[in-house]
Image (cartoon, rainbow, N blue to C red):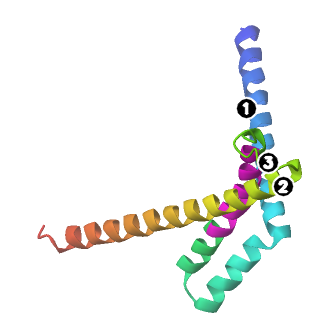
Amino acid sequence: MIFPGLIMLLVMVVLIGIGIGAGLFACAIAAGLTMLGVISSSVALGFLTKRPATAVRALLLQCGILAGIPAGAVTAWVGRAVLEKVDESWMIAVYGGIGGAFAGAVLALLLDFIFRRTHAWLEERVKQHKSLPS
């Protein structure tokens, strides 16, 4: 009787620990984005244009660029054999960061396009569904 209860208690403690860890990780990411001004500038842009879609688009674009810079730098540094004409290793990271920022911006704009098209499609489906006679 005590053994199954201890196993359930152990599982519960592990799941609570994972939840706390994930929450702290999310808070760290939010704090980093706030310190960089990504969230505040997106919110300010949303208030200025009075369109939440603009704020979401700005947030996606800024997060894509910020995620693309280190990803591109690491990718270029790992693939430095391709960039043989660049002698200085720190320049490889700079070129990779620029390429990653560009790729992140393209990815963010593609995601925004997909979200907007899906939203428009769903709105049209809801309108069609409401107009059908019951």
Amino acid type, callout 3: Phe
Q: Nearer the viewer, mark 2 or mark 1?
A: 2
Amino acid type, callout 1: Leu
Mark 1 crowd level (few <14, some 14–19, many ≥20, 10 Å Cα):
few
Answer above or below: position of 6 versus 107: above
Which residue position holds label 3? 25
Closest to the observer, 62 or 72 = 72
Q: Nearer the viewer, mark 2 or mark 3?
A: 2
Amino acid type, callout 2: Met
User: Which label belongs to residue 15?
Assistant: 1
Closest to the observer, 55 or 87 = 87
Closest to the observer, 88 or 9 = 88
Residue extending farthest to the front is 85
Name the image quarter holding residue 31: bottom right
Mark toward the start of the polypeptide (3 vs 1) = 1
Tell me residue 122's x, y (percent). Answer: 33, 65
Which residue position holds label 2? 91
Tell me residue 86's x, y (percent). Answer: 80, 51
For the magenta stretch, what is the residue range?
Answer: 61-76
